[in-house]
Each structure stands twice: as structure tokens, then as C-alpha cells.
Amino acid sequence: MTGAAARWRALVAVAAVVAVAAIDATPAAAEYGDVVINRRAERGGVRPVVFPHWFHRIRFRCKVCHSELGFRMRAGANDVLMADVIDGKFCGMCHNGQTAWGAEQCDLCHSGKPGTPPGIQGGNETRGPGRW
Ligand code: HEC
Ligand code: HEC
Ligand code: HEC
């Protein structure tokens, strides 16, 4: 092998390692992503809920939601009824027309593309409705 070819091979190998590392580093974490909540929504005849986690976590402490409001820290783990939200629980603690816009704004929460399963989507790619 010539010196140039060897150096080229080495470069390609390094590039491949870097590419793999970049893929691994993509945060599939809810902290940075958007969480689709769809245990009940579509069965109830409305679109899946898109929860922009990043948008919220830069405004509130983790414990507001994960301890005081009782949201379990696992995508898909929470059983939320719309009646609870209207009652001021879960999202409804803030989405009450005072701290934030209220429960009558169905489309702002139920904005997911039909068929999107519960779980984390992307990495902080949307501030809110529309993408997933
Ligand atoms: C602040 C966010 C938010 C708003 C606004 C909102 N929802 Fe929901 N809704 C949720 C969440 C979260 C769930 C739980 C989804 C799941 O687990 O699949 C839910 C679930 C539902 C469900 C299925 C569960 C059940 O209890 O029947 C229906 C139907 C529903 N919403 C209708 C509506 C309608 C109609 C409106 C407007 C009048 C609305 N929602 C506004 C967040 C919201
Ligand atoms: C405004 C409310 C809110 C705040 C603030 C918040 N979260 Fe969350 N978090 C949620 C909701 C809602 C879910 C999705 C639950 C579901 O799908 O049922 C979630 C999901 C998660 C998950 C699950 C990830 C997975 O892979 O399943 C983790 C981890 C998490 N949050 C960590 C944090 C941390 C760390 C902070 C603070 C830096 C934080 N959250 C702040 C509401 C919040
Ligand atoms: C601790 C308070 C709090 C909780 C709990 C909370 N939100 Fe919010 N949310 C806010 C505030 C404040 C805003 C900004 C409102 C504004 O801009 O007027 C907001 C904005 C949003 C937006 C729009 C983001 C944008 O780009 O403007 C969506 C969508 C949303 N919330 C969905 C939800 C859903 C779904 C839940 C429950 C899973 C939830 N929120 C729970 C406080 C909260």
C-alpha cells in the first residue's frame, strides 16, 4: 500500500468512528425531545398529544411536574384523563387560562399526527404543535 492510500484508509476509518459516535450522541431523552402522549387520545377520537418537554423544562423545575404534579418520569407511563386536565390536574395545573392558556384550546395539545405512538420524538425540534 502506498503511503497516501494508507493515510486515506486511516482517515476513512476515523470518519466512520466519528459518524457512529455522532449517531449515538443524539439525545433520545425526553428532557430535550418532544413527548407524544397517546395512551387514550386516539382511542378517544382526538389526535395524539404533543408535549414539548424542552419548552417546559427551561421554564419550570423538574419537581414541579415530576413530584408535585405526579407525572412519572417515563414516556407513556402516565394515565391522564381529559377530565383530570379540566379539573386542574396534570397539564391542567397550568393550562387553566391563568398560568397558561386553557383546556379549551384542544388543538394546541392534540396536535400530533394521527397514528404517532406514545414516546419521545426528535430532540428539541419543536416548541409546540405541528411537527409530530
Ligand atoms: C393542556 C393540554 C390539553 C388540552 C388543551 C386538551 N387536552 Fe385532551 N388530553 C390531554 C392529555 C395529556 C390527554 C391524555 C392523552 C393520552 O394519554 O393519550 C388528553 C386526553 C384526551 C382524551 C382521551 C381521554 C379521555 O379522557 O377521554 C380526549 C377525548 C380529549 N383529551 C379531548 C380533548 C378536547 C375535546 C379538548 C378541547 C376541549 C382537549 N382535549 C384539550 C391534554 C390536553
Ligand atoms: C411541565 C412539566 C414538566 C417539567 C417541568 C419537566 N418534565 Fe419531564 N416529563 C413531563 C411529561 C408530561 C413527560 C411525559 C410523560 C408521559 O409520556 O406520560 C415527561 C417525561 C420525562 C422523562 C421520561 C423520559 C423517557 O425516556 O421515558 C424524563 C427522564 C424526564 N421527563 C425528566 C425531566 C427532568 C430531568 C426535568 C427537569 C430538568 C423535567 N423532566 C421537567 C413533564 C415535565
Ligand atoms: C407547570 C406548568 C405547566 C404544565 C404542568 C404544563 N404546561 Fe404547557 N405550558 C406552560 C406555559 C407557561 C406555557 C406557555 C404559555 C404561553 O406562551 O402563553 C405552555 C405552553 C405549552 C405549549 C405550547 C408551546 C409553544 O410553542 O408555545 C404546549 C403544546 C403545551 N404547553 C402542552 C402541554 C401539555 C400537553 C401538558 C401536559 C402533558 C402541559 N403543557 C403541562 C405551562 C405548563
Image (tube, rainbow, N blue to C red):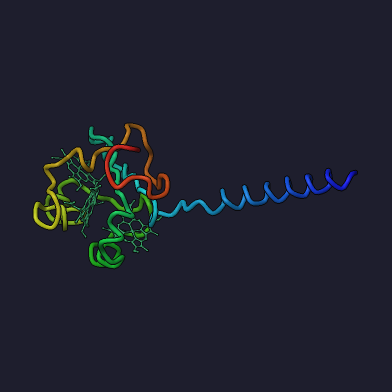
Q: How many marks?
A: 0
What residue is drawn where x is 27% and y is 56%? 56
Q: Looking at the image, which is closer to me, 79 or 94?
A: 94
Residue 128, by quadrant, is: top left
What residue is drawn where x is 56% and y is 52%? 24
Residue 25, by quadrant, is: bottom right
Residue 53 lies left or right of residue 19; in this view the side is left
What residue is drawn where x is 73% and y is 45%? 12
Taking the view exactly as shown, the residue that stands out farthest to the right is: 1
Q: Looking at the image, which is closer to me, 72 or 122?
A: 122
Relative to 112, residue 20 above or below: below
Relative to 111, residue 32 above or below: below
Q: Quadrant of the C terminus?
A: top left
* Place of residue 34 in the rendered image (x, y in percent of width and height, measured from the top left): 35, 48
Taking the view exactly as shown, the residue that stands out farthest to the left is: 98
* Place of residue 27 in the rendered image (x, y in percent of width and height, measured from the top left): 47, 53
* Place of residue 4 in the rendered image (x, y in percent of width and height, measured from the top left): 83, 45
Which quarter of the rendered image does ligand 2 occupy? bottom left
Q: Quadrant of the N terminus?
A: top right
* Place of residue 29 in the rendered image (x, y in percent of width and height, measured from the top left): 43, 54
What residue is drawn where x is 67% and y is 51%? 17
